[in-house]
Image: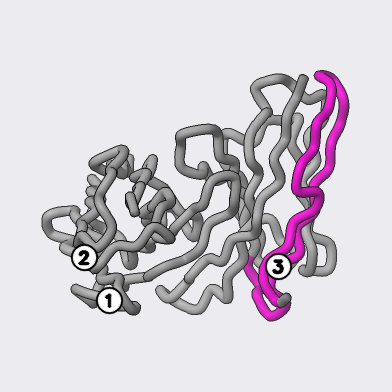
Amino acid sequence: DTGVSQDPRHKITKRGQNVTFRCDPISEHNRLYWYRQTLGQGPEFLTYFQNEAQLEKSRLLSDRFSAERPKGSFSTLEIQRTEQGDSAMYLCASSLGRGSVNTQYFGPGTRLTVL
Amino acid sequence: KQEVTQIPAALSVPEGENLVLNCSFTDSAIYNLQWFRQDPGKGLTSLLLIQSSQREQTSGRLNASLDKSSGRSTLYIAASQPGDSATYLCAVPTGANNLFFGTGTRLTVIP
């Protein structure tokens, strides 16, 4: 399978715990994005990487959130001291980023439930 | 600030019917618009991307149009099938690279 993969698919945690999600983009894609989606809403942008550089962060990305993309390949998204409001689907996408043709391809998502 | 609206929020049609989903956006300074499909509890599947220089894009039974001047896009689905049941999302690029999504239209095709 050469699509975007995410791990784990589901995560249940207790409030206050730390969680980490992983995203493996399509191999030749240099751009990687994280989005968050709550029930009944469209995805909301969190952060964007070009290769290993984190170039853009949304104001939704509070200090408890951190994302990395070492070596410009896979990426991790960590949430510290989780809160119930963090419960959502976390989606990763990647793209080739060539000019205006920047189709983003999404992974299956990680569903986080904070109890 | 960009706003993306999708109407209707939900739609039920009998199998075989042709249908149109609507997407409107407030900031017409976009260089493309993308339509996605999302099955319940799943990620997004890209359906069509229309560049600002195009007016239409077709893939199989799907046809998407873009009218930047009026801030509208439509997704036309011909001869709907139960397998088309899903949420359809439109998205426009905002900032340097990220996508701004509408809230989607939940489509149910009744056999």
Helix, strand or loop for disc 2: strand
Q: Which sits earlier in the primary sequence, circle 1 or circle 2? A: 1
Q: CA distance from mark 1 to mark 3?
A: 26 Å
- For the residues bearing labels 1 and 2, Cβ distance under 8 angstroms: yes
Q: Quadrant of residue A48?
A: bottom right
Q: CA distance from mark 3 to mark 2?
A: 29 Å
Image: magenta residue range: A2-31
- Closer to us: mark 1 or mark 3? 1
Q: Which residue is mark 2?
A: B66
Q: Quadrant of residue B19?
A: bottom left
Amino acid type for the residue under numbered disc 2: Leu
Q: CA distance from mark 1 to mark 2?
A: 9 Å
Q: Is residue A18 inside the magenta stretch? A: yes
Q: Position of residue B109 (x, y in %)?
A: 33, 52
Quadrant including the C terminus of chain A: top right
Q: Is residue B11 left or right of residue A96?
A: left
Q: Are marks 1 and 2 on the same chain?
A: yes
Q: Is residue A13 left or right of residue A44?
A: right
Q: Residue at x 77, y 68 (%)?
A: A72
Helix, strand or loop for disc 1: strand
Chain letter belonging to callout 1? B
Q: Which residue is mark 3?
A: A25
